[in-house]
Image (tube, helix red, strand yellow):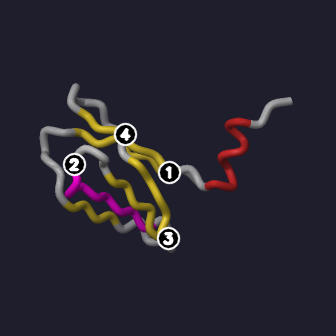
Amino acid sequence: MEFSIHDHASETYHPCKSARDGDWIIFTCPVCADYERRINWRTEELRVKGGKPEIQHSGEYIPGEYKHAFTATN
């Protein structure tokens, strides 16, 4: 399972950090201290706080158990 929030329609975008808290995937912006986007992966509920409309935020969440697939080599 992978969740992404990518929208590069604007030249002004900030890469976000992601973490999981129970059923919630939480994206935070290191530049915009008040920005937070939460996605409930079970219910698909979405909550967004803070941020400025002219700034696009970008991020992705990949569970730790799948990250090895991106670094594994033969």
Tell which of 44 and 17 is nearer to you.
17
Lower sequence index among marks 4 and 2: 4
Which residue does the numbered mark 4 point to in the structure image? 6
Which residue does the numbered mark 3 point to in the structure image? 42
Q: Name the mark on residue 61.
A: 1
Mark 1 touches mark 3? (CB < 8 Å)? no
Q: Nearer the viewer, mark 1 or mark 2?
A: 2
Q: Is residue 45 left or right of residue 33?
A: right
Q: Residues within 10 Å of mark 4 (few under 14, many from 20)?
A: some
Question: Percent from the top left, x then y, of residue 58?
Answer: 35, 41
Question: Percent from the top left, x then y, of residue 15?
Answer: 35, 39
Q: Is residue 33 above or below residue 69?
A: below
Q: Nearer the viewer, mark 3 or mark 2?
A: 2
Q: Looking at the rendering, which quadrant does residue 39 occupy? A: bottom left
Residues at marks 1 and 2, CA–CA distance in whole angstroms = 19 Å
Residue at (32, 64) in percent of width and height: 46
Q: Is residue 53 above or below residue 22?
A: above
Mark 1 touches mark 2? (CB < 8 Å)? no
Task: Pick the quarter of the image with the C terminus.
Answer: top right
Q: Residues within 10 Å of mark 1 (few under 14, many from 20)?
A: some
Q: Name the mark on residue 32.
A: 2
Say which amino acid is labelled 1. Answer: Tyr
Residue at (13, 39) in percent of width and height: 54
